Amino acid sequence: MLTSVYRPGTSPLHRARAGTKLLALAVGASALAWQRSVPAVAVGALVVAAAVAVAGMPARWVWEQLRPLRWVLLLVAGFQVLTQDWRLALVVCATLALAVLAAALVTATTRMQELLDVLQRLLQPLRRVGVDPDRVALLLALTLRAVPVLQGLIAEVGDARRARGCERSLRALLVPLLIRTLRHADNLGEALAARGVDD
């Protein structure tokens, strides 16, 4: 089903313009990636924590966004420790977690149609070279939507695997995840076709 991860609210973050939030996200994520330092990560963490509090998101929501990342963060941290050092591992993992959390916050406080409108306006100049801004904006919106969906599927499959006592089985994770992902893609295709996006 073509749904949104938007959580209704009246906070200042909910009322802020979609373009402003997307710009802040891009600038913040770029600054963290460029600085790559503990002080920068600390400032970024304070800013994201303040934004989460202003938006009125509960601690459970934060955990729901970060929980599916734990294995990725563990792998990234291990690789960085082996090839660089633990400080860089901390900075890289924290930067990734903050970027994901900030992006989730933008999509949770912004209606999908508002995001689509901003993306369409930004892509209008590309119409001259044959790019359809409407379709590109829809593709980007679906990509944004796919991230939390995949996170949720991974969490659900992981919980089911633990309940069956197959926590160490990679097959017990990958096969159900593939089936659920394909099922979601099929449902999404049907929803798009129903809306006339079928070519």
Image (tube, rainbow, N blue to C red):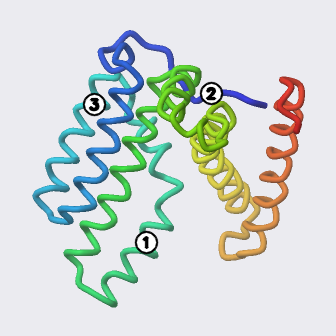
The picture places residue 165, in percent across and down from the top left corner, at 72, 67
Taking the spot 39% from the left edge, 81% from the top edge, the residue there is 78
Q: CA distance from mark 3 to mark 2?
A: 20 Å
The picture places residue 189, in percent across and down from the top left corner, at 85, 39
Q: Quadrant of residue 20?
A: top left
Residue assigned mark 1: 74
Taking the spot 33% from the left edge, 50% from the top edge, the residue there is 98
The vertical placement of 44 against 95, above or below, is above
Count the numbered circles shown. Answer: 3
Q: Tag on residue 180?
A: none
Identify the mark nearer the N-term, 2 or 1: 2
- Which amino acid, by three-letter code, is at mark 2? Ser
Residue assigned mark 2: 4
Q: CA distance from mark 2 to mark 1?
A: 29 Å
Residue assigned mark 3: 51
The picture places residue 36, in percent across and down from the top left corner, at 21, 65
- Which amino acid, by three-letter code, is at mark 1? Leu
The picture places residue 37, in percent across and down from the top left corner, at 15, 65
- Which amino acid, by three-letter code, is at mark 3? Ala
Q: Is residue 94 left or right of residue 65?
A: left
Identify the mark nearer the N-term, 1 or 3: 3
Q: Which residue extends farthest top?
A: 10
